[in-house]
Image: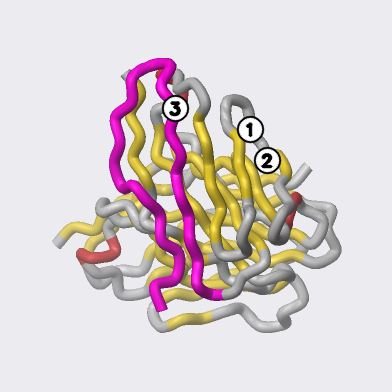
Amino acid sequence: AQKITQTQPGMFVQEKEAVTLDCTYDTSDPSYGLFWYKQPSSGEMIFLIYQGSYDQQNATEGRYSLNFQKARKSANLVISASQLGDSAMYFCAMRGVNQAGTALIFGKGTTLSVSS
Amino acid sequence: NAGVTQTPKFRVLKTGQSMTLLCAQDMNHEYMYWYRQDPGMGLRLIHYSVGEGTTAKGEVPDGYNVSRLKKQNFLLGLESAAPSQTSVYFCASSPTGVRGTSGFGQGTRLTVV
């Protein structure tokens, strides 16, 4: 069965420092996508970054990068130069070709707190 | 281009009452989904639809029904609300394939007393 595991309930970082949020996944699908979403205190789900299972290079979007290690089944999110506005809940998610309607499966999330 | 719009944003129900949550998307996406979010649980799939007129059960479907009469709309119904259905509900839509990025509605905070 497909599964996403986020083992860090909470992370703390100071402004301008880099932080890594961990995500491991389990799937038998040959083709899948990995996503990270940010949920600020206002509640909306904000898409951050995507990595396809066949992509050769790690995805990057501005200050966000995804450290994709396929053999280890990990897809960690790296935020460089943290800002106060990065304080939020972060969800790792996966979509597989054989999953129900290719629905996103989510991890339980990591709460990131950025301090000045 | 509004993306995905959910109504209402907040609702308080008494146990046993019924209600319908409406989701509308203007991105011409084939796939639509309803999730619930509970503290410490992430988002869990309730029901989904892979096209107009089709629906299927997700991980936690009990107590909910859905309909997709039009491609752009996906309705979630609670026939007899229970306190266990107190949650934040999200609607999402996506294009076909694993690369498609899902758009999410703003969420509906439902409290059942």
Q: Amino acid at mark 1?
A: Pro
Q: Nearer the viewer, residue A80 or B109?
A: B109
Left or right placement of residue B59 versus residue A87 in this view: right
Write down the chain letter for disc 2. Answer: B
Residue at the image position 40 percent from the left and 54 percent from the top: B6
State the CA–CA distance, disc 1 to disc 3: 16 Å
Left or right placement of residue A102 versus residue A4 in this view: right
Q: Is residue B2 above or below residue B77?
A: below
Left or right placement of residue B50 versus residue B111 in this view: right
Q: Which numbered circle lies on residue B2?
A: none
Mark 3 residue element = loop
Residue B35 visible in the picture = yes
Q: Mark 2 and 1 residues: CB-CB less than 8 Å, in contact?
A: yes
Q: Amino acid at mark 2?
A: Gly
Residue at the image position 67 percent from the left and 67 percent from the top: B30
Q: Which numbered circle lies on residue B61?
A: 1
Write down the chain letter for disc 3. Answer: B
Mark 2, other Cα within 10 Å: few <14 / some 14–19 / many ≥20: some
Magenta region, residue range: B1-27
Q: Amino acid at mark 3?
A: Ser
